[in-house]
Image (tube, rainbow, N blue to C red):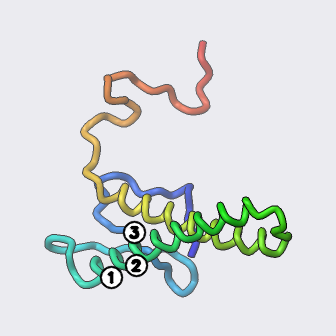
Amino acid sequence: MTYDPDNPQQPGSALRLLPWSTWDGRPCYLAASGDGNGFLSRRADRMEAQQMRNAAHAFTDAQTTLRNEAAGPLLLRLTLIRTTAALANTLRIADSRLGRLPASPLPEGQDEEGHVEPRQGMSDK
């Protein structure tokens, strides 16, 4: 499963990013109907909860491995592989939950205090 940081969901999205991908690696989305508590939504919630538990275990294992001065390159590599997979799942869950937040009433490019944020690529003059 991959995470694409260049295509995050926006708050207020009508689609829920699911915690699994298609057979060819593309993201899956769900257009929830009703209260958003249907079969697929509940299944996705359970899978996200398991992925978060796995991430907590991977984090703990990574800390233990890093404290182990005798850890060799293979153990470090396997720990890094597991930790990056857990991080990708966690980022995907965060992205999915961001899309389920209500859309901001603020105009694009304006912060909560009403200040207009400078556009990227624009130099200060």
CA distance separating discs 3 and 2: 12 Å
Quadrant in which the N terminus is drawn: bottom right
Q: Nearer the viewer, mark 1 or mark 3?
A: 1
According to the picture, the residue beneath numbered tag 1 turns out to be 43
CA distance separating discs 1 and 3: 13 Å
Q: Residue 15: image x %, image y %?
A: 32, 67
According to the picture, the residue beneath numbered tag 3 turns out to be 17
User: Do tag 2 and tag 1 residues touch (Cβ < 8 Å)?
Assistant: yes
The mark nearer the N terminus, 1 or 3, is: 3
CA distance separating discs 2 and 1: 6 Å
The kind of residue tagged 2 is Met
The kind of residue tagged 3 is Leu
According to the picture, the residue beneath numbered tag 2 turns out to be 47
Q: Secondary structure at mark 2?
A: helix
Quadrant in which the C terminus is drawn: top right
Q: Nearer the viewer, mark 3 or mark 2?
A: 2
Q: Nearer the viewer, residue 2 or 15?
A: 2
Direction from residue 81 to residue 115 in the image, left or right: left
Residue located 73% across and 59% down the image:
67
